[in-house]
Amino acid sequence: MRHLLIWAGLLVTSPVLASPLYSVPAPSAQQIAAALAPSSGPYRVGIGLPLELDSAVDGVWFEQDGRRVWEAEVFADGADALSLRFSHAQLPADSTLLLRGSDGSRQGPYSAKHVRGGQLWTGSLKGESVTLRMDAPLNAPARLGLGTVYYGFREALGAPSKSGDCNIGVACGAANPYQNQVRSTVLLQFVEGNSLFSCSGLLVNNTRNDRTPYILTADHCGIDSSNQDSVQVYWKYQYSTCVQPGDHVHRAPSASTSVSGVEFLADGPSSDFTLLVAGSAANPAVLPSSFEPYWSGWDVGLLGAQSGVGVHHPSGNEKSLSIFDTPVQPALADIDQNRTLTWAVIWAQGTTEPGSSGSGLWNQDGRLVGVLSGGGASCASLNEADFYGRLHIAWTEGLACDQQLRYWLDPDFSGALTHDGTDGSSPARAPSVPACNGQVALGPSATPAPTPAPTPRPTAPPGGSGGGGGVPGICLLGLALAGLRRRRGLVG
């Protein structure tokens, strides 16, 4: 479909005309049903629909306060939320793009620094319409070419809408001892193929304490160099008061506490980890204090956590808390057809859900020990186990720098097995990302000894409704193999 209205080269001296409206058809019931089907990947929250819109010939231009302004409105019947991909984005100096949702919420302003590879991805806005407003100097060659509208459907067209009632909001009293872990946790939204997905992640510290914005998430979420430009990282997406998530109407995360775009650095299937940096390796994002960021500490020793907490975004919604008070157990789990070395945890309070994948597991000392891969836990299955890829496996999972965490989180090869987090209040050097290019990561080794064979545990049921990110085939395999490590095809 082309457009309902075309305003060719129109420039008026005041905004006397309403923004031209361009409609995109809603997805079919078959498309929605296919999108909602259980999958082994990340949590799908939207479907991409084509809509070609070029500011050179579409929309309306007008002059205001000595500047050129372009406006257009996009409408998608029944959408819960909308986000956009501009296949062409030219925003010269002092030019910005602002999006306004039908509920008055905003995303942006976006500028040249948000354009990656000539394209621009935006955050989501609640509702079925969004107004685009580009503001530029009179003689600036500003131009936008819209290519895709991502139709959010999780609270539309009969789709399941809310995370379960047993989730614990991070403003509730149970979360008070864990606010550093809450501040570390982020929501990730990104494009893969023709869909919009959601996973959880966390901000993680390095031994230089230089506030490099490393983001850790799950490998099975599918973020890599092919879709890194589309990633939106959101901080502070949470309730400000103690409200159970199942009883609350969800809002869209705010662009005012987000970073647009990341760079892929490393991953490993044997521990189901992916490491990203917000911004790019050459120009890491500098996180403002308004984000209230916390760079999580970590523990890559062999001992499993005796108790602790998980913080995550269930069903892609506001942050929730899960608490465990019995020791985790080592387990070998089948994650996306990969044998993944995990910690199995049973929750005493709370749970996880699809969309929680990639979130952290912290031990009794508040240090990170794992990243959520999947499991059977849900509000309907409170006694089922969840499985977290073990951080000590990810530490030196492969020999190359893009197959391990140690190269990035201990860049001076100090040999540290534990490190504390930081909230940015202490002096720090400028963020810096080491060069990698896939070379072997040399330096003193902090590789732990092989994990002893664990005591067998019951098998987790396949097709569970919970378990951190839509990994329905989670099953506990032969636990005597828990010492197995796979390094990109090498076993050792």
Image (cartoon, helix red, strand yellow):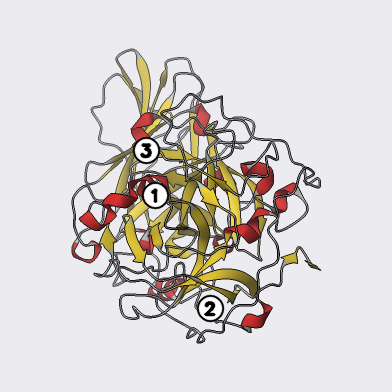
Q: What kind of residue is marked 1? A: Gln
Circle 3 residues within 10 Å: few <14, some 14–19, many ≥20: some
Nearer-N-terminus badge (1/3): 1
Q: Position of residue 45 (x, y in %)?
A: 41, 62
List the residue tagged with mark 2: 474
Circle 2 residues within 10 Å: few <14, some 14–19, many ≥20: many
Q: Position of residue 3 (x, y in %)?
A: 41, 48
Q: Where is residue 394 in the image (x, y as percent from the top left)?
A: 64, 57
Which image quarter is the N terminus in?
A: bottom left
Nearer-N-terminus badge (1/2): 1
In the depicted view, which residue is nearer to us: 24 or 31?
31
Tell me the number on the disc at residue 257: 3
Would residue 54 appear left or right of 452 to someone viewing this image?
left
In space, the residues marked 2 and 3 are separated at their CA atoms by 34 Å
**Residue 34, relative to residue 436: is it above or below?**
below
Q: Is mark 3 on a helix, strand or loop?
A: helix
In space, the residues marked 1 and 2 are separated at their CA atoms by 26 Å
Q: What kind of residue is marked 2? A: Ile
Q: Which residue lies furthest to the top in this view?
A: 66
Tell me the number on the disc at residue 462: none
Nearer-N-terminus badge (2/3): 3
In space, the residues marked 1 and 3 are separated at their CA atoms by 17 Å
List the residue tagged with mark 1: 181
Would residue 435 appear left or right of 146 to someone viewing this image?
right
